[in-house]
């Protein structure tokens, strides 16, 4: 199939199969991805590590505990963790992870996916503000500053990949890149993927933008927003954050290595796509954990410079796409 052709939307049963497969795989895989990055980092640093299943143990422990909330908090502290989790599940259903087929019931358009991501971003920021602590407000303000710089880069980078396809539908973009391997190594394709990698690091709070292992109040971003969250609420926040990381790694993996993803909504094809997704995300998680050992967190006022650089890469990718069209 050429880049300019389209695929007939899957039936309702096929769409349901793909959605259940993607959400199910991501729910099971997301904590493991966090565990792989931690274990890889520990091994590279010469430590034994807690094992790749430790995040699952942490979630099980947190789910058994009653959340303790500060006095005077509003309904935001009740709804924030759930909204973050639901937004992560929605993104897992929308992004073409296991199958790259147009689904009539699933609008996997770029703008829809970015909007759902933004809902989770805002929910997490409001959660940090609701308790009224200094560190929560500081983390939320930093979080929204990063989000304001990240979202345009996502739109421009994926727009660069959509130009040869003529559509902003992510499934069509992934399918076109799979059917045209030359586009993967093209200047536009490489620049756009590199820009997306920087965006994923910033959006998910990884080094060099944020240090997920830190508890130093003056430097942390994500941890500052969840300091007042505990018990089941903290479990939902952690799982929602891990889902966002796993889904974005899966999207980058499918854009960089689009092979193995299902092109039809059948059980054998979906199973093969699930295996390919696990392999890609696992490999990227290992690379992420190993790379973080050699990275240092940049100063806060340097973060806009880093994200501006990623936006320039995305803009150059758009320019290259038009020149090569």
Image (cartoon, rainbow, N blue to C red):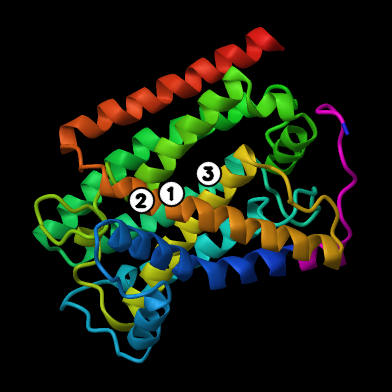
The answer to whether mark 1 and mark 2 are in CB contact below 8 A is yes
Looking at the image, residue 85 sits to the left or right of residue 275; the answer is: left
Q: Which numbered dot is residue 287?
A: 1
On-image quarter of the C terminus = top right
Left/right placement of residue 169 relative to residue 316 reads right
Closer to the chain start, of discs 2 and 3, is 3
Which residue is label 2 attached to?
290
Q: Give the image location of residue 324, x and y in percent.
A: 68, 11
- Tell me the residue at 59%/53% (across/down): 280
Is 211 left or right of 267, judged from the image as shown? left
107 in magenta: no
Label 1 residue SS: helix
**Is 160 situated above or below 137?**
above
Q: Position of residue 288 (x, y in %)?
A: 40, 49
Whole-number angstrom distance, CA of label 3 to CA of label 1: 25 Å
Mark 1 nearby-residue class (10 Å; few <14, some 14–19, many ≥20): some
Residue range in magenta is 2-17
Gap between marks 1 and 2 measured at Cα: 5 Å
Q: Which of the labelled discs sits on residue 117, or is there none?
A: none
């Amino acid at each position: 199939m050429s880049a300019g052709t389209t695929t007939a939307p899957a039936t309702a049963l096929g769409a349901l199969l793909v959605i259940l497969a993607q959400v199910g795989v991501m729910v099971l895989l997301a904590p493991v991805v966090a565990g792989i990055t931690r274990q890889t980092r520990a091994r590279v640093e010469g430590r034994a590590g807690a094992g790749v299943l430790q995040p699952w143990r942490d979630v099980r422990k947190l789910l058994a505990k009653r959340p303790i909330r500060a006095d005077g908090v509003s309904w935001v502290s009740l709804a924030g963790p759930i909204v973050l989790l639901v937004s992560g599940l929605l993104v897992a259903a929308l992004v073409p992870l296991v199958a790259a087929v147009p689904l009539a019931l699933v609008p996997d358009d770029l703008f829809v996916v970015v909007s759902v991501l933004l809902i989770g971003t805002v929910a997490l920021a409001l959660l940090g503000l609701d308790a009224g602590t200094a560190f929560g407000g500081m983390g939320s303000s930093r979080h929204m500053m990063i989000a304001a710089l990240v979202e345009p880069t996502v739109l421009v980078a994926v727009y660069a990949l959509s130009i040869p396809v003529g559509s902003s539908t992510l499934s069509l973009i992934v399918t076109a890149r799979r059917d045209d391997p030359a586009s993967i190594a093209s200047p536009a394709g490489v620049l756009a993927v590199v820009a997306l990698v920087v965006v994923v690091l910033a959006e998910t709070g990884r080094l060099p933008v944020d240090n997920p292992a830190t508890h130093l109040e003056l430097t942390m971003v994500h941890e500052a927003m969840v300091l007042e969250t505990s018990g089941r609420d903290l479990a939902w926040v952690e799982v929602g954050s891990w889902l966002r990381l796993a889904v974005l790694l899966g999207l980058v993996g499918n854009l960089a290595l689009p092979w193995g993803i299902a092109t039809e909504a059948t059980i054998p094809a979906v199973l093969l796509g699930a295996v390919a997704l696990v392999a890609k995300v696992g490999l990227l998680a290992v690379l992420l954990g190993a790379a973080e050992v050699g990275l240092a967190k940049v100063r806060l006022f340097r973060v806009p410079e880093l994200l501006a650089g990623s936006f320039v890469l995305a803009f150059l990718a758009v320019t290259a796409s038009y020149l090569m069209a």
